[in-house]
Amino acid sequence: MISIKETDLYNQVIKELNYSFGNVFIFEGFVISEINLGINLNWDEHAKVIVNDVSRFIGSNGKDIVYISHRINSYSVVASDWLKFFNNSFNLKGYYIVSEDKIRVLSSVIENLFFNNKIKRFNNLNTAINWIKIGID
């Protein structure tokens, strides 16, 4: 899998947020993250920063946004930190994980234990985006 920056989708990015731990791309109706290799993604150091920046930019708590975790790199997620996300009154219309690696997909099962909605999994980004565009959620 390749970065958004190397695809035709990059022309549709409304806002790009660059962090030391990864990049976030804001589109109309959805957000795509690409977290760097080896990061242990947690609420306090990473997710809170992303959520606050995206919320400020879009002007809402995310209830109309689909978040796509484009897992082009291997990294871990502190799954229990989803509770902190929801406890801070944030929400998502949907949460999609795009990964070709079955091990990364299996680790997302643990995330689903703490996420208060269903996590959808895809093995390519275009399919995930098509689900958003045709309103399947």
Image: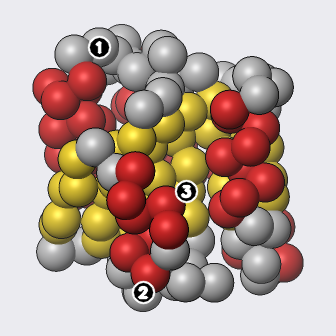
- Contact flag, marks 2 and 3 (Cβ < 8 Å): no
Which residue is depicted at the point 58% across and 71% down?
A: 71
Numbered circle sitting on residue 60: 1
Could you tell which of marks 3 and 1 lies nearer the N-terminus? 1
Pick the front one: 56 or 41:
56
- Residue 104 visible in the displayed image: yes
Give the labeled residue for mark 3.
69
Q: Quadrant of the N terminus?
A: bottom right
Name the quadrant containing residue 18. Answer: bottom left
Query: Distance between the Cα atoms at labels 3 and 1?
Result: 20 Å
Describe residue 59's horizontal placement relative to residue 79 as left or right.
left
Query: Does label 2 or label 3 sit earlier along the sequence?
Result: 2
**Residue drawn where x is 68% and y is 33% of the image:** 132
Q: Position of residue 15 (x, y in %)?
A: 23, 47
- First in sequence: mark 1 or mark 2? 2
Secondary element type, mark 2: loop
Mark sitting on residue 37: 2
In 3D space, how far apart are the residues under numbered discs 2 and 3 (Cα atoms)? 13 Å
Query: Answer yes or no: do the residues labelled 3 and 1 have beta carbons within 8 Å?
Result: no
Three-letter amino acid code at disc 2? Leu
Contact (Cβ within 8 Å) of mark 1 with mark 2: no
The C terminus: image quadrant: top right
Q: How many marks?
A: 3
Q: Is residue 104 left or right of residue 41?
A: right
Identify residue type, mark 3: Ser
Q: Position of residue 99 (x, y in %)?
A: 71, 71
Q: Position of residue 112 (x, y in %)?
A: 73, 42
What kind of residue is marked 1?
Ser
